[in-house]
Image: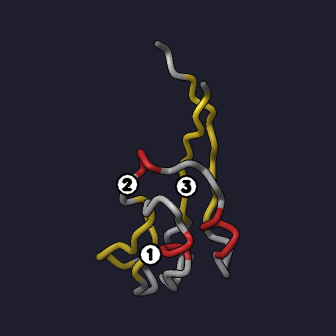
Amino acid sequence: MAKMRGAIVVDVEVCKGCGVCVPACPTDVIKLAKEVNGKGYHFAYMENPDACTGCTNCAIVCPDGVITVYRLKVTENK
């Protein structure tokens, strides 16, 4: 059976750290970094990348459109 795996790429220098993407993620993948970008904002990043399903919720709710989502269908070999 195929399972969806995902990954996000955040444009760190443009992210304002609003945090809207954090609760939108159903698998608790996204957190705000303790570090700041060049503008002084805590940016979003993948805290738990193995749990990402590529649902795109984070990209949909991002007000600045700085999140790109990639999806890959993974087949399990048994």
User: Disc 1 or 2, which lies upstream in sequence?
Assistant: 1
The residue located at (66%, 75%) in the rendering is 61
Pinpoint residue 9: horizontal percent, then vertical percent: 55, 57
Instruction: Say which amino acid is labelled 2.
Output: Asn
- 20 sits left or right of 37 in the view: right
- 40 sits left or right of 66 in the view: left
Pinpoint residue 78: horizontal percent, then vertical percent: 46, 12
For the residues labelled 3 and 1, the Cα–Cα distance comes to: 13 Å
Q: Which residue is mark 1?
A: 43
For the residues labelled 1 and 2, the Cα–Cα distance comes to: 15 Å
Q: Which residue is mark 2?
A: 48
Of all residues shown, which one is farthest toward the left?
34
For the residues labelled 2 and 3, the Cα–Cα distance comes to: 11 Å
Image quadrant holding the N terminus, namely top right
Determine which of the numbered discs, if any, sits on residue 8 in the image.
3
User: Disc 3 or 1, which lies upstream in sequence?
Assistant: 3
Structural crowding at the residue carrying mark 3, measured as other residues with C-alpha within 10 Å and reported as few (<14), some (14–19) or many (≥20):
many
